[in-house]
Image: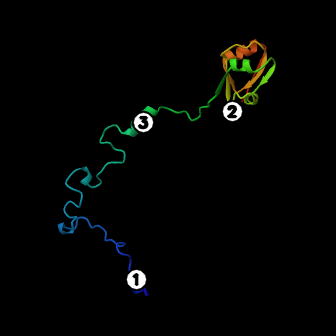
């Protein structure tokens, strides 16, 4: 086999389409673009996502989705009723002890103590946030409140 006898496989070489080179070529006069209209013009056609002037889907969706704050911190709420059922007088309550009592799955998320329920014994609570009513009830019962950073 010699270099001059090599041939490329059938169908691998194809002549480019020469548009606008006479009617006998098959792509003369209108150059395969049909007659008139936006798509036949030079630079014609519409951008991707264009819906003929109707309000495009992409613009509708942004109005429906609303605003998502990417800096939002999700707190796990824990009520005083839960604390009063699980703990005794002078207990130390922190995210770690709440995990031990199976109130929380882990300490990854910050917690907020809410004032739903009553507490009538002193406890020492350490959490990321407290509602005003929870703070007032714990202090009124003789307990202490400590906020984590």
Which of disc 3 and disc 1 is earlier in sequence? Answer: 1
Residue 3 lies, in percent from the top left, at 43, 85
**What residue appears at the point 19 percent right and 54 percent down from the top-left corner?**
35
Q: Are marks 2 and 3 in contact (CB under 8 Å)?
A: no
Q: Nearer the viewer, mark 1 or mark 2?
A: 2
Q: Are marks 1 and 2 in contact (CB under 8 Å)?
A: no
Q: Which residue is mark 3?
A: 61
Q: Secondary structure at mark 2?
A: loop
Residue 114 lies, in percent from the top left, at 66, 20
Which of disc 3 and disc 2 is earlier in sequence? Answer: 3
Q: Which residue is mark 1?
A: 6
10 Å crowding of disc 3: few (<14), some (14-19), many (20+): few
**Residue 6 against residue 25 in the figure, above or below:** below
Label 1, label 2: how many angstroms apart (C-alpha)? 71 Å
10 Å crowding of disc 2: few (<14), some (14-19), many (20+): few
Please tell me in which quadrant of the rendered image residue 119 appears: top right
Please tell me in which quadrant of the rendered image residue 42 appears: bottom left
Q: Secondary structure at mark 3?
A: helix
Which of disc 2 and disc 1 is earlier in sequence? Answer: 1
Residue, far bottom? 2
Q: Nearer the viewer, mark 2 or mark 3?
A: 2
Q: Nearer the viewer, mark 1 or mark 3?
A: 1
Q: Which residue is mark 2?
A: 105
């Amino acid at each position: 086999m010699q270099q001059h006898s090599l041939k490329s496989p059938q169908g691998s070489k194809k002549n480019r389409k020469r548009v606008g080179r006479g009617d006998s070529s098959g792509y003369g006069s209108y150059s395969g673009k049909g007659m008139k209209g936006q798509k036949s013009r030079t630079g014609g056609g519409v951008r991707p996502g264009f819906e003929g002037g109707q309000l495009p889907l992409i613009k509708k969706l942004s109005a429906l989705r609303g605003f998502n704050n990417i800096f939002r911190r999700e707190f796990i709420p824990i009520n005083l009723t839960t604390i009063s059922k699980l703990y005794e007088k002078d207990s130390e309550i922190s995210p770690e002890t709440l995990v031990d009592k199976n109130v929380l799955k882990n300490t990854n998320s910050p917690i907020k103590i809410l004032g739903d329920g009553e507490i009538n014994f002193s406890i020492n609570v350490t959490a990321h946030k407290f509602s005003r009513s929870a703070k007032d009830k714990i202090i009124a019962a003789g307990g202490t409140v400590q906020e984590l950073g």
